[in-house]
Image (cartoon, rainbow, N blue to C red):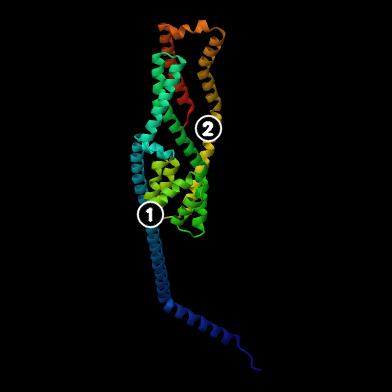
Amino acid sequence: MFGFDPTVIAIVALVAVSTGAIAYGLLFSRIETEKKTNSRINKVRAAETDRANMKAARDRVQEISKRRKSVQDSLKELEKKQAERTKKQNELSLKARLGQANLSITPVQFYLFSGAFGLFALLFSFLAGFQPLVLLGIFVIATLGLPRWILGFLVKRRQKQFLEEFPNALDVMVRSIRSGLPLNDAIRMIASDGQEPVKSEFRRVVESQQLGLGVPDAVARMHQSMPLNEVSFFSIVIAIQGQAGGNLSEALGNLSRVLRDRKKMKAKVQALSMEAKASAAIIGALPFIVTLLVYLTSPDYIMVLFTDARGHMILGVSGVWMSIGLLVMRNMINFDI
């Protein structure tokens, strides 16, 4: 076996270290240059990626802004149309009111019925022995007032029935659209299988489509026969979906939930104001009740108001002030939601 001289080993090690140091010193600049180059390349790539991400983010923001602007423009246009419809609604003709009540009579027939009812009331009052001024008042009320009040009552009753069923119809449309049916088929389903009066209103929408109108325009015409805010909301949702797109089933589902919440709020307000309404009814009926009781107990004492001219004046002034008081109480206890 050969022995290793430590001096030789040390010399070899020093030579190796010196060679490595010399090589590192010669290649150091190149290694640093490559590191800097790689670092710059990575920074450039990262910057390009950041620019691409920023550009994509800007594109998304611009797309969202364009869509928001489109929705805002659509809402402004719909609000303008709604204001025009409201203005026309304030000038409704008798024919439109009869259509809202779903009565199959013409305005001429309504006027004939009103006149016949007024003559019947006049004849009955004349046989009862009322004074001529009272007869004239009864004739005017029976001819012009009571029939129109009955017509308004029928319109409000039908609108109330519509609001009871409308959220259910929207839920059926949502389920139909989520199952894959188009909007037209969902509307036709309500028009054929829905409950009245929603069924009749949607049937009018289908008939308008058959005449050539688009779905948004056909739905917007529903406000003419059913002038409610809920119908306006529905037409706005359909119009926005037709112009800007979006998830129609989600929008209709949110609308159905909003309508149910409005219904709950109306019921809550009605319950809270019921005490005030009962008080107003009692106060309004109290003069008539007292007059009747006095007439039953002392008819000669109360008849002076009806036979003397001064009593007529007192009754007239009292009626005016009582009407003003009832009107003020009515405005205090009625709330629009």
Image position of 187 with respect to 150: above or below? below
- To which residue does mark 2 refer? 269
The residue under label 2 is which amino acid type?
Val
Quadrant the N terminus occupies: bottom right
Residue at screen point 38% across, 66% down: 48
The residue under label 1 is which amino acid type?
Gln
Residue at screen point 48% across, 29% down: 334
**Numbered mark located on residue 246 in the image:** none
For the question of whether residue 6 can be seen, the reply is yes
For the question of whether residue 67 can be seen, the reply is no
> Which of the pair 297/18 is nearer the observer?
297
- To which residue does mark 1 refer? 210
> Which is nearer the N-term, disc 1 or disc 2?
1
- As helix, strand or loop, the secondary structure at mark 2 comes to helix
- The reply, left or right, for residue 263 in relation to residue 126 is right
Tell me residue 275's x, y (percent): 56, 25
Tell me residue 25's x, y (percent): 44, 77
Residue at screen point 54% across, 35% down: 267
Tell me residue 287's x, y (percent): 51, 15
Tell me residue 288's x, y (percent): 51, 16
Residue at screen point 51% across, 84% down: 15
At label 1, counting other C-alpha atoms closer than 10 Å, the crowd grade (few under 14, some 14-19, many 20 or more) is few
